[in-house]
Structure formats: C-alpha cells, structure tokens
Image (cartoon, rainbow, N blue to C red):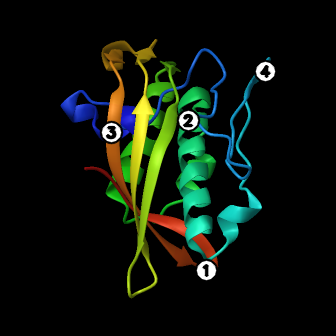
Amino acid sequence: MALAACEEEDRPTSPAPSDTPSVPESSLPNEPTTTATETGPVEPTLPAEAKKESEAGVEAFVRFYFSVINYATKSGDVDLLARLHQPSCAGCEAGVEGIKRVYGRGGRIVGSDYTIARLEPTRSDSEHWAVVTHTRLGEQRTIGAGDMNRSFEGGKAKWLVSIARVRGDWSVTTLEVL
C-alpha cells in the first residue's frame, strides 16, 4: 500500500485514489474493477474465481485485494480492506492506518491506481501461498491533510503478498515491498 505503509520513508504505502476511473491493464474475465461514479468510487465485489482454492483463485484474490486498496485510497473507506487481512500483517495494518489518518484530517488521496503487471504465485507445503506481485502506479498526491500532504512519483514495485485460508476465506498474512 503506497501512501500508508512507507510513510516514514516518504514512499506510498496505500494506493491513492485517482481523479479518473481506472482502466484495467488486462482484460481477464474474473478481474475485479473499480469504477468511479458521480457519487464516488464503488466498492469492488469479490469475483467467484477469487473464492477458489486453486492457483487461479489465488491470483484472482490478489487482483481483488489490489482493487480494494485502490478503492480505499479513493474513498477513505477502509472497512473491506481491513477485513481482508490478518491483524498480524504489519504492512496491511500500516496501509489501513495511513489511509485513516489522511481522511481523518479531512484530506484525500488523488491520482493513479495500482495496476498489476504480473503475478508469480508459489504454494508452500503448509498450503499457504506467496505471490510476488509486480505493480505499476502513476503519480499520487495526498491533499488537504496538512503536514501529511505529499506527492509520490509512482513507478514499478514488487510486493510479497502472502495469503492463507482462514475460516474458509483467503486472508492476507504478509504485505511488503520487495
């Protein structure tokens, strides 16, 4: 998460909202999308594929997770994002808290969405998955949040996203920039 997780390093930790609707980089049939409306961004819906216990299900869940990051940064609504990870995920918690701080001060995050360029999933013997996630992010800005206002150039990043089944659903256990 760009703006929230790396705030201390002046790097984004939670994806920032954009002024324009995002355009998915690929046209996979089960890829979640977030579309801006006249009333604001729409919360993404978990695709059926993202519920499956398979490599395709893992990839669909990670794509969904990043669409929820994009939604949370545009809207300030972190409820769904917070439900998708375990409390022990420090990178996840930092991202959620960063978004809450910006919006809590009356600010907002504007600019580009994360797009996923490539996913590299690996399954462990313990049935957990580690997914190296290659992303692109354009410029983002935090505005209206006082001393938290910043600009982030964007660029390419690799993330380690570890997920596991918890009570029958996928949950993020690790989120960190590689």
Q: Mark 3 — residue?
A: 157
Q: Is residue 83 above or below residue 167?
A: above
Residue 160 in the image, given as x and y percentages of width and height: 34, 56
Marks 4 and 3, the one that precedes in the sequence: 4
Give the crowd class for mark 3: few <14, some 14-19, many >=20 residues within 10 Å. some
Q: Mark 4 — residue?
A: 39
In the image, is 120 to the left or to the right of 112? left
| Circle 1/circle 4 CB separation < 8 Å | no
Which residue is nearer to you in this view: 78 or 175? 175
Q: Which mark is residue 167?
A: 1
Q: Gap between marks 3 and 1, in whole Å?
A: 31 Å
Residue 23 in the image, given as x and y percentages of width and height: 64, 27
Q: Gap between marks 4 and 3, in whole Å?
A: 31 Å
Marks 3 and 1, the one that precedes in the sequence: 3
| Circle 4/circle 3 CB separation < 8 Å | no
Given the image, on which type of amino acid does mark 4 rest? Thr
Q: Mark 2 — residue?
A: 70
Give the crowd class for mark 1: few <14, some 14-19, many >=20 residues within 10 Å. few
| Circle 2/circle 1 CB separation < 8 Å | no
Residue 33 in the image, given as x and y percentages of width and height: 69, 39
Given the image, on which type of amino acid does mark 2 rest? Asn
Give the crowd class for mark 2: few <14, some 14-19, many >=20 residues within 10 Å. many
Q: Gap between marks 2 and 3, in whole Å?
A: 15 Å
Q: Gap between marks 1 and 4, in whole Å?
A: 34 Å
Q: Is residue 149 above or below residue 80?
A: above
In the image, is 27 to the left or to the right of 54? right
Marks 2 and 1, the one that precedes in the sequence: 2
Which residue is nearer to you in this view: 101 or 20? 20
